[in-house]
Structure formats: structure tokens, C-alpha cells
Image: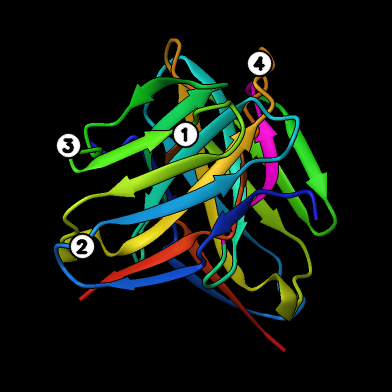
Amino acid sequence: DTGVSQDPRHKITKRGQNVTFRCDPISEHNRLYWYRQTLGQGPEFLTYFQNEAQLEKSRLLSDRFSAERPKGSFSTLEIQRTEQGDSAMYLCASSLGLAGNNEQFFGPGTRLTVL
Amino acid sequence: EDQVTQSPEALRLQEGESSSLNCSYTVSGLRGLFWYRQDPGKGPEFLFTLYSAGEEKEKERLKATLTKKESFLHITAPKPEDSATYLCALRYGGATNKLIFGTGTLLAVQP
């Protein structure tokens, strides 16, 4: 399968713990995006990378959130000191990054539950 | 102010009963309108991109159209397997590549 993959698919944690999610984009895609989706809502943009550079961050991305893409391939999203309000589906997407083409292809998501 | 609004929130159709979903937007400088399908517990699946008013794209029973203020996703003779949430998203403005999503239309097609 050459699609976007995410790991883990599900994570249950206690409030105050740190969690880290991984995303592997489609291999030839140089843009990688993180979104968050809560029940009944559309995905909300968090941040995006072009190669290893983090080019845009949403104000939703508080100080407790950090994302990296160290070698321009896979990316990690870490949430420190989790809160119950962090419970959501975390989606990763990737795109080719060609001028005028921003078709983003999504992974299956990581569902986070904070108890 | 909502930048992208989808209607209806939910739609129930009988198999074979054609209908349309609406995505209206208020932004200027549109650089792409995207339609996705999302099944429960899964990530959105890309369907179409539309870039300019008058553009149309088709895939199987789905046809997407775009005007200067809205897009329609027409579903012709739907089948139960078309049941899903359909999301539209916008890319607009300057250098940003983020997508702004609507809240989706939940479609149920009954046999």
C-alpha cells in the first residue's frame, strides 16, 4: 500500500501524559499536513511542512503541541500534558507540492482519547 | 463568520433517488475547492478538485460543479455504498496551503 500511513491508530491516555503520533506520507510527496477532527466537525488545520521546514502553524497549535519532520520524510506530532479537550481524531495528509496542485491525500487517522 | 457552509447537514435517499449536496463559500481569491468522502472512523478520501467557475468533474455516479459562490455535488442513482459523509474544503488567499473544511453532509442511501 503506497498511501499515507499513521501510527498508532488508537491511543488512550490519562490526563497529563505525553503522547506522540507518527505519519508516513506518500513517498514522492514533499508537503505534509496535520489536521484535527472532532465528532460532527470537518478537519481543522494544525500545521504543515514543505520538506523539513514547518511553514505554517494554526493558532490551535498551543505550546503543548509540537510537530517535526526531521529528514523531510515521516513526521511526528507530540502533545505534552494532555487534556480531555485534546480528545479527537488526528489526521495526516500529504501532497505533491507542485504549483497549482494542492490535492491532499489523507491517512486513516489516530484517534486519541484522554481520560 | 463561516467561510464554507454545507447543506443539508444530513440527507436520506432511497436507492436510485438522485439529489445534490451544496457547498457555499464567502471567501475571495479561491485557489481550489475540494470534495472528499469520509466513512466512519476513517480519513477523508479525495474525490475532486475544482479551480474555476463553470468547471465540472465526474466520477462514476458523482458530478461536481462550481460557480463563483457555491459548488454542488450531484449524486445520480445512488447506491447504499454511497452512504458516507461528504466534505468540501477551500484553499484561498496568498501563500497558504491549508484547507478550510465545512462540517459535511451525512448521506444515507437506503436499499
Give neighbour class at mark 2: few <14, some 14-19, many 20+ (Cα, 10 Å): few
Disc 3 to disc 1, C-alpha distance: 22 Å
For the residue marked with disc 3, what is the amino acid?
A: Asp
For the residue marked with disc 2, what is the amino acid?
A: Gln
Q: Is residue A101 left or right of residue B100?
A: right
Identify the residue position indicated by label 3 in the image: A63
Identify the residue position indicated by label 1 in the image: B99
Disc 4 to disc 1, C-alpha distance: 14 Å
Disc 2 to disc 1, C-alpha distance: 30 Å
Q: On screen, B20 above or below B79?
A: above
Q: Earlier in the sequence, mark 4 or mark 2?
A: 2
Chain for numbered disc 3: A
Chain for numbered disc 2: A
The residue depicted at 56 percent of the width and 55 percent of the height is: A6
Identify the residue position indicated by label 4 in the image: A100
Quarter containing the N terminus of chain B: top left
Disc 3 to disc 2, C-alpha distance: 15 Å
Considering the numbered disc 3 on the image, is that residue within a helix, a strand or a loop? loop
Q: Earlier in the sequence, mark 3 or mark 2?
A: 2
